[in-house]
Image: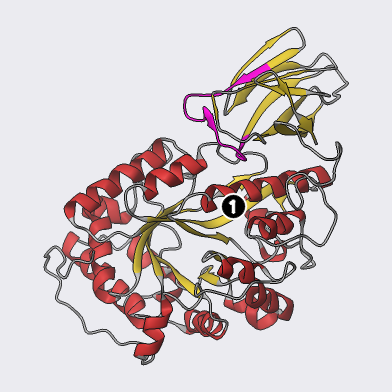
Amino acid sequence: MRLAKRASHETPRRTRRGRRVVGAAFAALLGAAVLAPAAPAAADAPLRDHAAQQGFEIGAAIAPNHLQNDSQYADLAATEFNAATPENAMKWSVTEPSRNQFSFGQADAFMDFAQANNQKVRGHTLVWHSQLPSWVENGNFSRSELLSIMENHIDQVAGRYAGEIAYWDVANEIFLGDGSWRDSVFYRTLGPDFVAEALRMTAEADPNAELWLNDYSIDGINAKSDAYYNLIQDLIAQGVPIDGIGLQAHLINGQVPSSMQQNIQRFADLGIKVAITELDVRIQMPASQSELEQQARDYRAVMDACMNVNGCIGVTVWGVSDQYSWVPDTFEGQGAPLLFNENYQPKPAYDAVHEALGGTSDGGGDDGGGDDGGGDDGGGTSGPCAVSYSAANEWNTGFTGQITVTNNGGSALNGWELQFDFPSGQQLSNGWNAQWSQSGSTVTATNTSWNSTLAAGGSVSIGFNASHSGSNAEPESFTLNGQSCSVS
């Protein structure tokens, strides 16, 4: 529910100027155009066709400069995705680089592309500590001055596109990993109320847009996601307009939080929407085929976690192809995080997302293709469980092991225990997402308190570090609660 009145302060209201007149018909269609009931999609149709058929959003972060300079990029962005987020074009440093001097060339180009291709738009982002001009960061403004600056910025940016944007990421990355407030200029000057102020201001600037918070490392249940859960409860109790929470999901290969679906569900239970807003899964380069297959399983796990919760409305990947991903410049030695490779060819991760949406892959049948049982080792049935195992990041005498366990049974497991034997004298050092122990060659991984339930068809990703003395053969068999699992 929207509030008609925001908390009072000294700032007078400014008059907005929209970039164009938006007809009532377009405004009415904004919420439904992409998600209207669709005719059945062909099995090999693009992602957006299958997503639309399910009332789901599959989006990408899009950069206007690549649209203008790379036709393959533009074609994929238009063909595959029914939702779009501006990668940088609406951030403060781009839209208001100098005080009250606004620049909307990039944002307008992005909006024109999204509207021409019938894509729902997520505005990103209004209030953020990063990519903030120095005049804001270092201005030493009083409380009333900074409120006025924040209101003017929101008024000009959100107001310009009023009626054209479905969702605004109003406040971005406001907490640290331990759940404490990030020491931003907004928090230092305005205190924690800056979030409620920004939400109210955006509700006035664009009454039709949904208002969201957004952050990384809140994909599973942890101190940081707890902080958002508590904040949203408080905002709702205070009558502050809040419609959704975005889980960015910048993930490491093989490390999808096992509590992701549970986390999505608890936010949805508050009565707000949830979306995966910036998904990528980075790999230590060069990427091997087994790592690309693990990445595909990770993408499928994220899709399933969202699609299994009624309140989770969509998944957006943070870029169109590996060609322009932010990952290699940010995480040294890592890359290949997206659905299409640098040559714009679909990867196993694309097939995994396609299948999650109800399509079929065109090829190779690696691990989990089609209908869950189809054609890899073992013929007709996959048994009560399936395990994928890979050794990553090997060094002279050690390695990181990554395991994904899938419950193929017809009912949930309330408590689980995975066992396997190291065949080459490997010794467990430490692990995560499970309670780990080793006796002789036998390794046991038992659920933690927060991932004890493994739903029918659900998966849990766990991992460990271990040492070896030169040979590092993979385990040949695994049991889950005493029953043998198929292995890939």
Please tell me whether mark 1 sits on a helix, a strand or a loop: helix
Q: Amino acid at mark 1?
A: Met
Q: Quadrant of the C terminus?
A: top right
Rendered view: 176 above or below 215: above
- Residue 487: image location, x then y, percent: 79, 32
Q: Residue at x 37, y 60 (%)?
A: 212
Comparing 301 with 70, the one in front is: 301
Q: In the image, residue 173 lies at what x, y percent?
A: 41, 52
Report the side of 183 relative to 41 (left or right): left
In this orientation, does residue 102 appear? Answer: no
Residue 155 image point, x, y percent? 28, 76
Report the residue at 23% width, 73% height from top: 204
Residue 395 image-quadrant placement = top right
Range of magenta residues: 444-460
Image position of 85 (left or right of 231): right
User: Where the N terminus falls, by quadrant?
Assistant: bottom left
Of residues 300 and 126, which is closer to you in this image? 300
Q: Is residue 453 magenta?
A: yes
Residue 473 shows in this picture? yes
Residue 243: say if magenta: no
Image coordinates for residue 311, horizontal then vertical, percent = 42, 55
Figure quadrant of residue 150: bottom left
Decide: is 411 above or below 205: above
Seen as rendered, the residue at the extreme top is: 440
* Residue identified by numbered label 1: 303
Q: How many C-alpha atoms fall within 10 Å of the one at disc 1: few (<14), some, or many (≥20)?
A: many
**Nearer to the camera, 264 or 436:** 264
Q: Is residue 396 left or right of residue 127?
A: right
